[in-house]
Image (spheres, coloured by chain):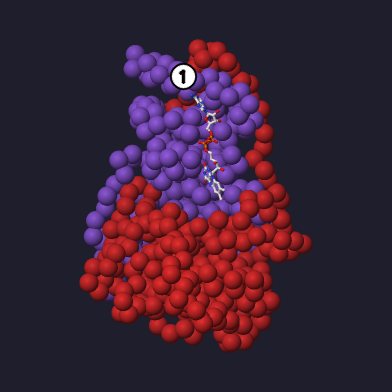
Chain colours: A red, B purple
């Protein structure tokens, strides 16, 4: 039997974003989608779960995530949990990890906690490690393949120079790479099983968190300035004669080659 | 209170980051490096050098525990590490233990009084955020290879050997399969990147021969990866790696914003594209309008002669 908890985040579905007066991403207008690496983590969990195992999904975000969470039930997840509270707005990675820890404690022991390796909006990849530390368990990041080997997990972790294979004993946190697994579609059987199941909602109070521990107040980093920076136009010269072009490229290569 | 920067490089020194620390707080830099890199740490400005002498560390959580204990003794007020995959895993664990705010993958650092102002790109490079920590200890990971190493020899650096006894192995090393292409993209000085215009796996093979000859890294656009021309680890952009080489050669790449997000920080950008209207030319320092294969074949020929 194995119980797997998957932490997912909804991110704006566009690449042009707006920020408010406190440098928080404006999420109201933007349509949301599950972060791509988190979908990979979800599928990893669904394929690792055994007959008696469960996959529980937890996310922190606005109430409108109920529908997309419901959809995850139809894809085979057993339980879906939404942490939602105005107090949580503006959370940095630490405040987020704090909320996820409280939810994980409340949900009961998991053998494995999966996260995406980073979100495409903040791109910090810090929540998995902070969450693991908060729970006192190890964390292995950047994993592209997970498989059971009796009661241990074989993890294939992509580092800069190659793939490291590790054998791990739970409980632990693993962050999964985008595109490693592609999330299955809703199935007839899962849809039938999902019927009657609802999204469980937790507020800060439900998790025993005070206003000081949540959101902007519970954060230890503060954005003090933000500027939008679209890559600057360089508008360099264009060469149509390949021979001349190659000559110029050669010169540039000589400049940078040791 | 007097400030001190700790530069954490237990898996390998980032000389540029150490130089940057020495520039931010001259004379008050502590480094934690593998024993074999002691001399280099002294060369790039560390005043106190902790040399780690132990076998392969597999469990970064265990190392984070050890460092949290040490930091209580050292009292460093700023902790920096290169944003490598392993350190980006270790630093959040350490930050939690130290009740410290942590900023990921910074591209600029600056002191404002006793505050470390950390600048990082967000949302696919379209926003640059300046961030300050609200905690006593300020922590950041910094994009590797971003700062150029500047020698500041310090022959009087204090050397403190450290050992680590990680007893319980919740994680065990099983195997390591190195990528055939040696250098990580994030540290390559030259990158040859191919897009859909390259058209096939065979085309990419040509690019990889050129990359090897130039001592360059091989990269690809997402479309080229999706088409199976190159493996995912080569993908540059919003959903791939971010790179900042001295020279980025974009071959048959149109220049979509999601691709630009990963390479627009390159020092020099050269685009080779048959379409004179391709957006990539606008973001390039130099463009060659024409068929990629003609250009690359000619370059290869010259390399051989
Ligand atoms: C959420 C999201 C995330 C994304 N993340 C990424 C990412 O991380 N990285 C990324 O790269 N993309 C990403 N994309 C995809 C991106 O939008 C583009 O589709 C992609 O970058 C295009 O790749 P390309 O330039 O190789 O192909 P194309 O846009 O098809 O361009 C091919 C180019 O090759 C040129 N060409 C054709 N034949 C020749 C020839 N013989 N010689 C020379 N030139 C020739 C053409 O003129 C054209 O400019 C993302 C998209 C989304 C929606």
Image quadrant occupied by the N terminus of chain B:
bottom right
Question: Image quadrant of residue A241?
Answer: top right
Residue at screen point 39% across, 28% down = B203
Image position, residue A37 (x, y; %): 47, 59
For residue A61, above or below residue B195: below
Residue at screen point 48% across, 42% down = B222
For residue B56, above or below residue B222: below
Residue B4 visible to an observer of this rendering: no
Image position, residue B18 (x, y; %): 49, 50
Asked which secondary structure carries label 1, the reply is helix
- Give the residue at mark 1: B295
Image position, residue B122 (x, y; %): 61, 53
Image quadrant occupied by the C terminus of chain B:
top left
Residue B130 visible to an observer of this rendering: yes
The chain that hosts pointer 1 is B
Residue at screen point 62% across, 66% down = A221
Question: Image quadrant of residue A44?
Answer: bottom left
Q: Residue furthest right?
A: A21
């Amino acid at each position: 039997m194995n119980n797997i908890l998957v932490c997912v985040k909804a991110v704006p579905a566009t690449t042009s974003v707006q920020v408010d007066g406190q440098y928080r991403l404006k999420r109201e207008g933007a349509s949301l989608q599950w972060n791509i690496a988190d979908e990979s983590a979800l599928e990893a969990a669904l394929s690792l779960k055994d007959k008696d195992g469960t996959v529980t999904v937890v996310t922190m975000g606005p109430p409108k995530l109920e529908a997309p969470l419901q959809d995850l039930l139809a894809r085979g997840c057993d339980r879906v949990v939404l942490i939602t509270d105005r107090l949580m707005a503006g959370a940095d990675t630490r405040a987020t990890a704090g909320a996820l820890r409280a939810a994980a404690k409340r949900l009961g022991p998991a053998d494995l906690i999966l996260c995406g390796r980073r979100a495409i909006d903040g791109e910090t990849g810090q929540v998995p490690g902070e969450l693991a530390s908060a729970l006192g368990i190890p964390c292995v990041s950047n994993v592209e393949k997970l498989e059971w080997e009796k009661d241990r997990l074989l993890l294939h972790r992509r580092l800069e120079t190659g793939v490291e294979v590790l054998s791990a004993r739970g409980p632990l946190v693993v962050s999964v790479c985008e595109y490693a697994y592609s999330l299955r579609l809703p199935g007839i059987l899962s849809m039938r099983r999902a019927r009657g199941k609802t999204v469980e909602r937790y507020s800060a109070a439900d998790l025993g968190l005070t206003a000081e521990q949540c959101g902007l107040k519970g954060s230890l980093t503060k954005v003090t300035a933000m500027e939008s920076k679209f890559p600057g136009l360089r508008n360099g010269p264009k060469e149509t004669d390949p021979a001349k072009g190659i000559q110029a490229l050669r010169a540039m290569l000589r400049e940078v080659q040791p | 209170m007097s400030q001190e920067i700790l530069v954490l490089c237990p898996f390998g020194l980032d000389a540029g980051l150490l130089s940057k620390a020495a520039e931010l707080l001259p004379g008050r830099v502590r480094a934690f490096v593998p024993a074999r890199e002691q001399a280099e740490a002294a060369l790039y400005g560390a005043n106190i050098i902790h040399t780690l002498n132990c076998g392969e560390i597999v469990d970064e959580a265990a190392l984070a525990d050890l460092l949290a204990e040490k930091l209580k003794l050292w009292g460093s007020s700023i902790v920096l590490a290169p944003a490598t995959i392993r350190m980006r895993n270790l630093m959040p664990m350490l930050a939690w233990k130290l009740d410290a705010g942590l900023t990921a993958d910074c591209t600029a650092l600056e002191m404002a009084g006793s505050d470390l102002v950390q600048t990082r790109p967000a949302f696919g490079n379209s926003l640059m955020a300046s961030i300050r920590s609200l905690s006593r200890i300020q922590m950041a990971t910094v994009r590797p290879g971003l700062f150029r190493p500047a020698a500041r020899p310090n022959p009087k650096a204090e050397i403190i050997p450290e050992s680590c006894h990680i007893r319980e192995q919740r994680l065990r090393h099983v195997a390591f399969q190195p990528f055939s292409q040696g250098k990580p993209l994030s540290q390559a000085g030259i990158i040859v990147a191919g897009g859909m215009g390259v058209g096939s796996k065979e085309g990419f093979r040509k690019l990889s021969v050129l990359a090897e000859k130039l001592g360059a890294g091989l990269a690809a656009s997402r479309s080229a990866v999706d088409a199976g021309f190159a493996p995912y680890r080569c993908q540059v952009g919003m959903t791939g790696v971010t790179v900042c080489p001295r020279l980025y050669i974009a071959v048959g790449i149109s220049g979509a914003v999601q691709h630009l997000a990963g390479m627009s920080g390159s020092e020099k950008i050269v685009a080779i594209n048959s379409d004179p209207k391709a957006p990539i030319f606008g973001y390039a320092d130099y463009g060659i309008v024409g068929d990629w294969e003609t250009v690359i074949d000619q370059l290869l020929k010259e390399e051989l002669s």
